[in-house]
Image (cartoon, rainbow, N blue to C red):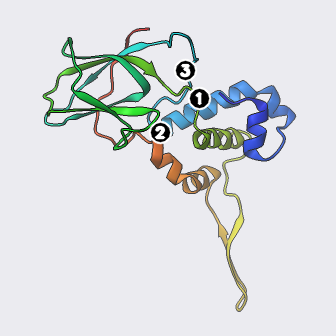
């Protein structure tokens, strides 16, 4: 996902001997945490020729035309209750010109049908902003989760100092709220698949 050189570039520092020794473990922990924060898988899919496809099933919500999915880059087949369908648009929220997608929008309202998608799921390469989040979560693996003690505000007269008394995790959520919001699937109305049909 990220190698040592990319991590050091994103963190703007050299990795410690401990971080290098535990590189894969710390990256796995960071990726799991990021997937939990985003409510979706982020692991890049190995690029193969032809592309590796997976079939996943989703349940449509009654009275809606949008079915939210796992992140995907291509659809080779889409079936509604077992019947091939073409009356849909690939979307990333409201953007149909994206390079990856997280939903399909049908031309008509749905009524609880089973949507079966065969396609290329995941990112071909992790976007730079998600790579940054992954690197920052990697960085947090080696730090204590106590408050950081940074000064939040100062006052000269009557000498008042206020400390930024929040944990490093809380600071991370605050610092990167925009990126987390951009990719989060946590608050979209959808029912995820029960698992892959085949790989």
Tag 2–tag 1 contact (CB < 8 Å): no
Compared to residue 108, the image places residue 45 above or below, namely: above
In the image, which disc is placed on residue 191?
none
Q: Residue furthest bottom?
A: 157
Check contact, mark 3 vs mark 2: CB within 8 A: no
In front here: 144 or 31? 31
Q: Does residue 181 lie above or below 126 as drawn?
A: below
Find residue 156 and report its horizontal and vertical position in percent. 73, 88
Cα distance, mark 2 to mark 1?
17 Å
User: Which residue is tagged 1?
Assistant: 125
- Extreme residue toward the right, this view: 17
Residue drawn 81% across the image and 26% down it: 21
Q: Position of residue 109 (x, y in %)?
A: 14, 34
The residue indicated by pointer 3 is 45
* Category of crowding for the residue at label 1, using alpha-carbon neighbours closer than 10 angstroms: few (below 14), some (14–19), many (at least 20): some
Q: Secondary structure at mark 2?
A: helix
Where's residue 85, x and y in %?
22, 19
Gap in Å between the C-alphas at discs 3 and 2? 18 Å
Measured from the top left, where is residue 107 in percent x and y? 18, 33
- Is the residue marked by circle 3 packed among few (<14), some (14-19), or many (20+) residues within 10 Å? some
Using residue 199 as the reference point, say whether residue 110 is left or right of it. left
Q: Earlier in the sequence, mark 1 or mark 3?
A: 3
91 or 34, which lies in front?
A: 91
User: Which is nearer the eye, 186 or 18?
Assistant: 186
Residue in the picture at 48% in, 29% down: 41
Q: Earlier in the sequence, mark 3 or mark 2?
A: 2
* Rendered view: 54 above or below 188: above
Chain-order first, disc 2 or disc 1:
2
Secondary structure beneath label 3: loop
Would you say 16 lies left or right of 39 here?
Answer: right
């Amino acid at each position: 996902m990220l190698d040592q050189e990319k991590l050091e570039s994103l963190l703007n520092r050299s990795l410690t001997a401990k971080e290098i020794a535990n590189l894969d473990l710390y990256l796995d922990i960071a990726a799991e945490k990021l997937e939990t924060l985003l409510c979706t898988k982020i692991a890049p899919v190995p690029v193969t020729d032809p592309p590796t496809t997976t079939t996943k099933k989703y349940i449509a919500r009654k009275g809606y035309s949008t079915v939210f999915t796992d992140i995907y880059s291509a659809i080779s087949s889409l079936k509604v209750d077992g019947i091939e369908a073409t009356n849909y648009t690939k979307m990333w929220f409201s953007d149909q010109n994206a390079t990856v997608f997280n939903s399909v929008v049908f031309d008509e309202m749905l009524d609880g049908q089973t949507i079966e998608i065969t396609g290329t799921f995941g990112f071909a390469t992790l976007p730079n902003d998600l790579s940054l989040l992954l690197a920052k979560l990697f960085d947090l693996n080696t730090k204590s989760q106590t408050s950081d003690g940074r000064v939040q505000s100062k006052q000269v007269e009557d000498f008042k100092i206020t400390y930024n008394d929040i944990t490093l995790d809380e600071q991370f959520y605050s610092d990167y709220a925009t990126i987390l919001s951009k990719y989060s699937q946590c608050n979209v109305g959808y029912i995820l698949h029960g698992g892959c049909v085949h790989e």
